Image: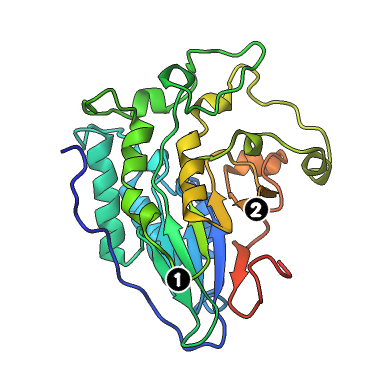
């Protein structure tokens, strides 16, 4: 079997505080010293009763990933995580393939108490609660089928020569004509099919809808100026995500879905779901205005003291 049926980690921290908050963050890329410093500068007292959703791409280096997760676990009562594409990079042939690297990352999370399976978040008996549901995923390329988020782009390089995943990920035979995206989505089946007794916040690294790739006029205005395409030959929609991920979000009935991957921050409601991306991204992207509104903290997305998830946020 490509993926075994081992149980994913289940421990959950509890808090006696009168309210519990959920924060969102992704794409820390702590291989950059400036980004690791950003993580280490987070308050050691502000979030001790709170939950962090970390939507992938912390580091391809397991030592750096361990250090960042350890720092975040010291600051938050609970950290939820899904691997991104960078976590599955293989640089030194230390793993047979990216599937083996994936399971090593999951094992590391288990050792640290970082959650990669659903968990119920509540401040205590009788208080408002929410389920946090991680969704594993990968992107589907246009040549792999209709599940891709592909949109044509004038002058694009269809070979994606600049895309590092082409050189740093490797896959075993998947069998039955399945794509990598389908293999990861299948891991979510048992969590998507179950019933939840409180509202659901789901999260993934990859993008679930094509609309989320592109700025609205309001978002462009918020960025302060029209931004030139930094990579005119690169079509991100080829490697953004897959429609199967959106189908799982809808099956869950998520009220909020957190994602990352694109390094473009979003806060957008579509058909009853609030989609949130709060990425740190690369230092150069922040300096050039491509990643904006990051500030110095993760993004607050839910508070048990509020009547609903989006009131006052």
Question: Residue 115 is drawn in which quadrant?
Answer: bottom left
Question: Mark 2 to mark 1: distance in Å?
Answer: 19 Å
Does residue 281 show up? yes
Position above or below: 251 against 50: above
Q: How many marks?
A: 2
SS state under label 1: loop
- Residue 306 percent across, percent down from the top left: 66, 77
> Which residue is identified by label 2?
272
Position above or below: 13 against 59: below
Please identify the quadrant where the N terminus is shown. top left
Look at 35% across and 59% down and name the residue there. 117
> Which residue is identified by label 1?
197
Question: Residue 172 is drawn in which quadrant?
Answer: top left
- Residue 241 percent across, percent down from the top left: 49, 35
Position above or below: 183 against 18: above
Question: Residue 85 is drawn in which quadrant?
Answer: top left
Look at 37% across and 51% down and name the residue there. 64
């Amino acid at each position: 079997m490509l993926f075994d049926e081992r149980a994913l980690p289940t421990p959950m921290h509890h808090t006696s505080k009168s309210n519990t908050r959920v924060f969102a963050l992704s794409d820390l890329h702590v291989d950059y010293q400036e980004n690791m410093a950003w993580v280490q500068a987070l308050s050691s007292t502000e979030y001790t009763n709170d939950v962090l959703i970390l939507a992938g791409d912390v580091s391809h280096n397991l030592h750096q990933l361990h250090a960042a997760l350890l720092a975040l676990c010291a600051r938050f009562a609970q950290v939820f995580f899904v691997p991104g594409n960078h976590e599955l990079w293989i640089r030194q042939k230390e793993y047979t393939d990216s599937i083996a690297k994936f399971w090593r990352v999951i094992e590391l999370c288990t050792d640290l108490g970082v959650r990669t399976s659903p968990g119920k978040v509540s401040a205590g008996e009788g208080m408002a609660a929410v389920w946090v549901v991680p969704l594993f995923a990968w992107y589907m390329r246009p040549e792999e089928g209709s599940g891709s988020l592909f949109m044509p782009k004038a002058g694009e390089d269809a070979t994606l020569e600049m895309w590092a995943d082409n050189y740093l990920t490797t896959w075993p035979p998947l069998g039955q004509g399945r794509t990598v995206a389908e293999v990861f989505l299948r891991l979510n089946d048992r969590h998507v099919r179950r019933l939840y007794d409180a509202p659901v916040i789901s999260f993934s690294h990859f993008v679930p809808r094509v609309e989320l790739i592109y700025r609205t006029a309001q978002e462009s205005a918020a960025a302060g100026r029209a931004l030139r395409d930094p990579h005119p030959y690169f079509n991100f929609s080829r490697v953004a995500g897959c429609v199967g991920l959106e189908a799982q979000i809808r099956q869950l009935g998520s009220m909020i879905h957190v994602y990352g991957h694109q390094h473009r921050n979003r806060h957008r409601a579509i058909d009853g779901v609030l989609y949130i991306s709060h990425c740190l991204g690369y230092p150069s992207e922040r300096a050039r205005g491509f990643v904006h509104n990051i500030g110095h903290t993760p993004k607050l997305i839910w508070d048990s003291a509020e009547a609903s998830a989006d009131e006052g946020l």
